[in-house]
Amino acid sequence: MKHTILFFVYTLIRVVCYAQNDYNTELIPSSLLSRANATIRSEETVVDMRAADNVIYAVKQVITVLNKNGESNAGLVLFYDKSTIIKSVKGEIYNAFGKLHAKFSQNDFIDESAVQNFSLFEDNRIKRFSPSMNTYPYTVVYQYEVRFKQNLIIPTWYPKPADDVSVEKSTYSFICKPADKFRVKSKNLLQQPVESINEKEKRITWTVRNLPGIKSEPYSPHREMYEPFVKIAPEDFTYYNRQSNYTNWQELGKWIYDDLLKDRATLPATTLAVIQNLVKEEKTAQGKVRKIYQYLQDKTRYISVQIGIGGFRPISASEVDRLGYGDCKALVNYMQSLLKAADIVSYYCVVNAGDEKRSLDPSFASMNQANHVILCVPLAGDTTWLECTSQKIPYGFLSNFTDDRIVLACTPSGGKLLRTPKYTAQQNLQKRTANFVLNKNGNINGEVNTVFQGTQYDHHDHIVDKTPSEQEKFLKKVYPINNVNFDKITYTENKDKFPELLENLAMSVNGYGAINNNKLFLPINPFQMKIPIAEVRNRLMPLHLNRGYTDEDNFTYTLTEDLKPVLEPLNKSLQNQFGSYVATTTLKDNVLTYYRKFVLNEGTFTAASYVDFVTFINEVNTAEQQRCVLNLK
Amino acid sequence: MKFPLSLILCTMLSSTVFSQQFDYGKINYEDQLIDRNTIDSSANAVVIQEYGTSRMFLNDDGRINLLFKYHVKLKIFNKDGFRHANIVIPAYKGENHEEYISEIRASTYNYNAGVFEETMMDKKAIFTEQRSKYIELTKFTLPNLKDGSIIEYSYELLSPNIFNYKSWDFQSDIPKISSEYQVNIPAVYNYNVVLRGPYKLTDQKVERDNECMRLMGAKIDCSKISYIMKKIPAFIEEDFMTAASNFKSAVYFELSDSQRPDGSKQSFTKTWKDVDYELKSAKEFGGQMKRKDLYKDIIPNIIKDSPTDLAKAKAIYGYIKKQLKWNNYYGINTEGNLKAVMDNRTGNVADLNLSLIAALSAADLDAEAVILSTREKGLVNKLFSVITEFNYVVAKVNIGSESYLLDATEPLLPFGLLPLRCINDQGRVINLKKPSYWIDLKASQKSTTSYILAGTLGRDGKIKGTITTHSLGYDAFMKRQEIKKYNSIAEYVEKLDEKMTNLSIQKEEILNVDSLDNILTEKYEIEFSVHDLTNADQLYLNPFFINRISKNPFNLSERTYPIDLGTANDERIVINITLPEKYELLEKPKDLGIALPNGGGKYVLQTTLNNDILTITQLKQLSKSIYQAEEYPYLKEFFNKIIQNQKTDLLLKRAK
């Protein structure tokens, strides 16, 4: 008996010690402390697909917050809605030595709406918790279970939530019935998953270990390019009481078309008649689409109404017709219905919108890759794309919001992947000409004409319809020239697929050139300069330039007779893989001419080349700060 | 026939006198004709008419409730004005204090071929959102909007909160042609009425409304007061200004006293004496301020090495800041009791600062509370004691003849300096034993930064040397916050080095990052290129390497509101450069000495070359924390002069 008791005591002590030591922050390997503000000590995520409408998502996370900057990773936010139920959530907080400091439960979470800005209706809510500790490091343990009443969307596993978080160990298990079929997309993982199967369940587990923190670097590619992730898409799915299946984009697009868009396109007879009347004079399909698009822009506006079917199904066309507003799905669906009234075919296209170009993954179909909808009108030899949420955007112009990326067109024959138009570095043009007169007081005045094209079109587009006083305020902000006065401001727009905005200014600046000791110092470029960019010591990430553009300037300064330049003319020319730069000044008679052209190329370049990129941009910056020195006669 | 005529006249008169109430759904052709150019050419929408009423009534449970009715008609000029058709009405949902929104109606009118087409909003298009535990939002938007649409909506809000009688904003971000608010106040209630903003009422009417309410069987008369304002310009926010509510035209009410059925008076916040008593006896204020017992055992250990009262106060302030963490909520009342705050180590502003007061008192220091209103909340009115205008409380400790204001919410603030959000006119000192009084809320330290660059210009055109920076006040506070964003000084300097592209930092030393009461000193050994033409006999050099001003912060043509910088500030830059050989200073930026009127500030620049040492000194002082709108042109010109001067270069010539 003695033996047993001893053994028992021993185990007890061991357990106690273990519990004590487990969360001791001194146990974190030093390799995980560098560049990290928090460390995930361990995380286990289990997705148990018990049935298509009953998926249990269970997580146990142990995270050590190393310092104040790690606070942003210390909290937990859980989303819920009609099909997402938080079953349980609780946790503990431990001090630096791994000693229990406090426990918390669901009651300690703040419950609030997830809606941002003006959205009429969304049923998404959140529960959030943030520990209030101000001595570091400390450790938080979260344990929660969420039930999804659908399996169309299984959350993607990103074991490393941020650059400044390191990970000791994290696992992800997906469990389902042995007969269940699903597709997997994973990337940037070092270890192969472990699979097991028995008569009850199939289980597949991924593990990552010892992922260090890294420094966030500017011009980096998207996180999915370098961080591990696992995406899972079950073949048979249930979603808000709808059942279907898909294994590729063709089938998913078919389901969206057949199920979510079905019966949404009916319009009242009066509107049909209006549309038919509207286009009856138009000979070409293009002409008809253009007219109907104008009708849409005049009649509707964007209001977010994320209602029903998890925000995937548009409200009906007849409803939009009556209300005059809708969200992106509703407005695209409405536009599609209007076009149909004129016998024009169009496609409802799901897209991942945003300035950063991100395509749907052609190799992996899933429902949670997009956030927006646009319309594609496949006219013969002239495929036209329509953004339906803006009342001002030119016909056929997509802007930097949805340009150059793969989208899913939902057609009667199923989904098709299409690519939206690309605006090249040459097309994204800002071309400025200015003719100034410079006098001996350093005053300049003259006309400035700027053409904005391609994705640069929207830079000043929002100011066009504003009042003169607002335009003046805006211009003073974007052209922060001391003492600037705008005597005339006019805008002309050419709203087309490749739209153009012309800005015509008459401006004067008193004391633009500074006078000292009978000399006049003239900054050669009054407008924007390339801002110098930061160096990055020991760069790790490739250099990613998301979109190219061209800025071209042609300025003249007509010098009054009492002025004479003394400095050597500028002649700078740079050319490399990132782009090119030319700047010259020439003097002919009494006219000083400044020409400058900067081209930035789109592309991804090696991390090592970042140094050259910095040199390039900063050399440009230096050249643009050039000042001409003139003698006063 | 004479009689009926005068009767008609009389009725007409009374209806105009009575109110500007207007019928729902009656749109006039005049509304359609409204041209924005005659009102405000920059307006995207205009309120044509706005009418609200508030009245008290007894509900079924015998409690007095307030019923607020709102009705408005707007014209939307263009698409930029469409957002004024997105309506959000918040309702407070506290325990036993629920507000209800009802009777929502909304319509859009579009003028088409001589008639107004009305589109009524569907009731189904009204949504509610539980924004947080206490706030429910009712949201709707108007259908069928077009450029030039007229929209109209109305609703009712039922509130049990009669203490703060519903206030009324005459001014909003779009202009209004007419705005009227009518309040019906039973004679048993007395409210303090405060009218804010630069605009005067166009009209105000008071009438007696006989037997408007029954209270415990007694019939009570009401005062019916109408506040009318017409042609109200839009409110436009400007940079460097405090709370918009300080400047917006609005009318506020605060219950001052009420008469009980037996005729006796119940006073609410009539005098500071009452407020003092209320605060001191409140469980969430005075009750917690007194809890020095909580700190009795801890304090001796904290102050054991502190010989003077000042040292004790500093030690305790440091201890509380370290021990307690602010949860980012404001308030003059504690959320819990100080024992719980001590255990959980977190709380709101009152939790932290009343803890501080309790701890200071536990060391037998003379500590008081100062209640105040933050800059973004606005100024408090000093005619009446309106307790709900205060949203923040700090500690005041009196040592000898000096007193210090302390706030424990910001760990990086030095002793005696309040955060900028608290620098807002005056606060009220609440003492447990004495009557309350006003105190100025001023930054105890000027924001001061000085830069000293001592360097040598090499023949390669590079300057090598040391930059030493001393900062104090908010400058130091903000810099410490910036430094603390990084995990180490090395990381901070790495980032700094990366940011300053033309300059490289070889070595750094930062002193007093954690010793908050001392000057923050940064020393950087640096190297940067100034010129690549060093071989030439002459060289141009722009000596404004440090904090060159290129944008004028005051570039508007007109300014309406005072310019509130929060604190005076002071910047000195001294540059000493040893030249590689004998040079002559041929030209230099003009030596300058300019000043703002009324001692508002000055700027001095001086350049000298003495025995191969080039010295440039600059001093820029803004001595006031608040400048009046009339002083704007001077500020603008002041910066203008500095900018112009900083554009010019030095010209050095190699001596032969």
Image (cartoon, coloured by chain):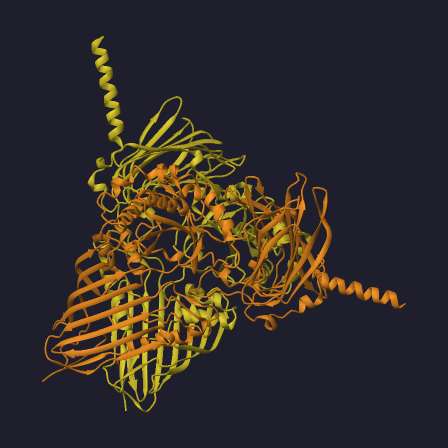
Chain colours: A yellow, B orange
The image quadrant where one finds the N terminus of chain B is: bottom right
Residue at image point 21% right, 74% down: B616
As drawn, B5 above or below A149: below
Q: Quadrant of residue B507?
A: bottom left
Front residue of A444/A454: it is A444
Left or right: residue A381 versus residue A22 is: right
Q: Quadrant of residue B249?
A: bottom right
As drawn, A204 above or below A515: above
Q: Position of residue A398 (x, y in %)?
A: 46, 59
Q: Position of residue A182 (x, y in %)?
A: 41, 34
As drawn, B87 above or below B237: above
Q: Is residue A161 visible?
A: no
Left or right: residue A46 versus residue B229 is: left
Q: Position of residue B446 (x, y in %)?
A: 31, 63
Q: Is residue A500 visible?
A: yes
Left or right: residue A319 versus residue A626 is: right
Q: Residue reaching furthest top?
A: A1
Front residue of B171/A423: it is B171
Left or right: residue A148 versus residue A25 is: right
Q: Position of residue A367 (x, y in %)?
A: 45, 42
Q: Report the label total.
A: 0
Residue at image point 29% right, 49% down: B313
Front residue of A201/B128: it is B128
